[in-house]
Image (spheres, grey):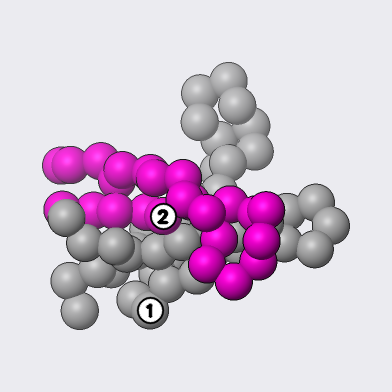
Protein backbone atom coordinates (compact mmCIF):
# COMPACT_ATOMS: atom_id res chain seq x y z
CA UNK A 1 0.00 0.00 0.00
CA UNK A 2 1.26 3.48 -0.86
CA UNK A 3 1.63 6.19 1.78
CA UNK A 4 0.11 9.62 1.55
CA UNK A 5 2.46 12.47 0.67
CA UNK A 6 2.36 15.79 2.49
CA UNK A 7 3.11 19.13 0.88
CA UNK A 8 3.35 22.42 2.80
CA UNK A 9 1.94 25.34 0.80
CA UNK A 10 0.91 28.92 1.46
CA UNK A 11 -2.73 29.32 2.50
CA UNK A 12 -4.70 30.64 -0.47
CA UNK A 13 -6.95 32.97 1.56
CA UNK A 14 -5.11 33.91 4.76
CA UNK A 15 -1.81 35.80 4.36
CA UNK A 16 1.22 34.56 6.31
CA UNK A 17 -0.40 31.17 7.01
CA UNK A 18 0.43 27.76 5.62
CA UNK A 19 -1.55 24.60 5.02
CA UNK A 20 -0.61 20.98 4.47
CA UNK A 21 -1.95 19.29 1.34
CA UNK A 22 -2.46 15.53 1.52
CA UNK A 23 -1.77 13.76 -1.79
CA UNK A 24 -2.41 10.09 -2.57
CA UNK A 25 -1.68 8.41 -5.90
CA UNK A 26 -1.33 11.79 -7.61
CA UNK A 27 -4.64 13.17 -6.26
CA UNK A 28 -5.17 15.95 -3.74
CA UNK A 29 -7.38 14.17 -1.18
CA UNK A 30 -7.38 16.55 1.81
CA UNK A 31 -5.89 19.63 3.42
CA UNK A 32 -4.89 20.29 7.02
CA UNK A 33 -5.33 23.78 8.43
CA UNK A 34 -4.61 25.32 11.81
CA UNK A 35 -7.75 25.83 13.90
CA UNK A 36 -8.55 28.64 16.31
CA UNK A 37 -6.75 27.77 19.54
CA UNK A 38 -4.66 24.62 19.81
CA UNK A 39 -5.67 22.11 17.17
CA UNK A 40 -6.08 21.41 13.49
CA UNK A 41 -8.86 21.12 10.94
CA UNK A 42 -8.85 18.38 8.26
CA UNK A 43 -10.91 19.22 5.18
CA UNK A 44 -11.75 16.79 2.36
CA UNK A 45 -14.53 16.24 -0.15
CA UNK A 46 -14.27 12.49 0.35
CA UNK A 47 -15.85 10.31 3.06
CA UNK A 48 -13.47 9.39 5.87
CA UNK A 49 -13.11 7.31 9.04
CA UNK A 50 -11.36 8.38 12.22
CA UNK A 51 -9.35 5.73 14.05
CA UNK A 52 -8.27 6.54 17.59
CA UNK A 53 -5.58 4.54 19.32
CA UNK A 54 -1.96 4.20 20.19
CA UNK A 55 1.00 3.85 17.92
CA UNK A 56 3.65 1.85 19.73
CA UNK A 57 4.89 3.97 22.60
CA UNK A 58 2.82 6.99 21.50
CA UNK A 59 -0.50 6.64 23.38
CA UNK A 60 -2.58 9.35 21.70
CA UNK A 61 -2.97 9.04 17.94
CA UNK A 62 -5.81 10.00 15.60
CA UNK A 63 -5.62 8.53 12.11
CA UNK A 64 -7.92 9.88 9.40
CA UNK A 65 -8.51 7.34 6.62
CA UNK A 66 -9.88 8.98 3.47
CA UNK A 67 -11.93 7.01 0.93
CA UNK A 68 -10.49 8.72 -2.13
CA UNK A 69 -11.87 6.29 -4.73
CA UNK A 70 -15.45 7.61 -4.62
Which of disc 1 and disc 2 is earlier in sequence? 2
Q: Quick one: 64 or 9, which is closer to the camera?
A: 9
Q: Determine which quarter of the picture holds residue 68.
A: bottom left
Label 2: which residue? 21
Q: Is residue 15 magenta?
A: yes
> What is the count of numbered marks?
2
Q: Nearer the viewer, residue 56 or 41?
A: 41
Taking depth in this image into account, of 19 and 13 the one nearest to the observer is: 13
- Of helix, strand and loop, which one carries label 1? loop
Taking 42 as reference, is 38 left or right?
A: right
Apparent side of residue 26 relative to residue 66 in the rendered image (left or right): left
Residue 48 higher or lower than 61, as above or below: below
Residue 53 lies, with reference to residue 38, above or below; the image says: above
Range covered by the magenta-colored residues: 1-25
Q: CA distance from mark 2 to mark 1?
A: 13 Å
Rendered location of residue 58, percent (x, y):
60, 26
Q: Which mark is residue 45?
A: 1
Q: Residue at x 55, y 61 (%)?
A: 11
User: Of helix, strand and loop, which one carries label 2?
Assistant: strand
Q: Quadrant of residue 21?
A: bottom left
Q: Quadrant of the C terminus?
A: bottom left
Measured as percent of width and height from the top left, residue 7 is found at: 39, 45
Q: Closest to the observer: 17 or 3? A: 17
Amino acid sequence: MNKSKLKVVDHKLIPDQQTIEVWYEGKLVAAVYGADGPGIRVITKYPYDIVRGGLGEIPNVVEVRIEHER
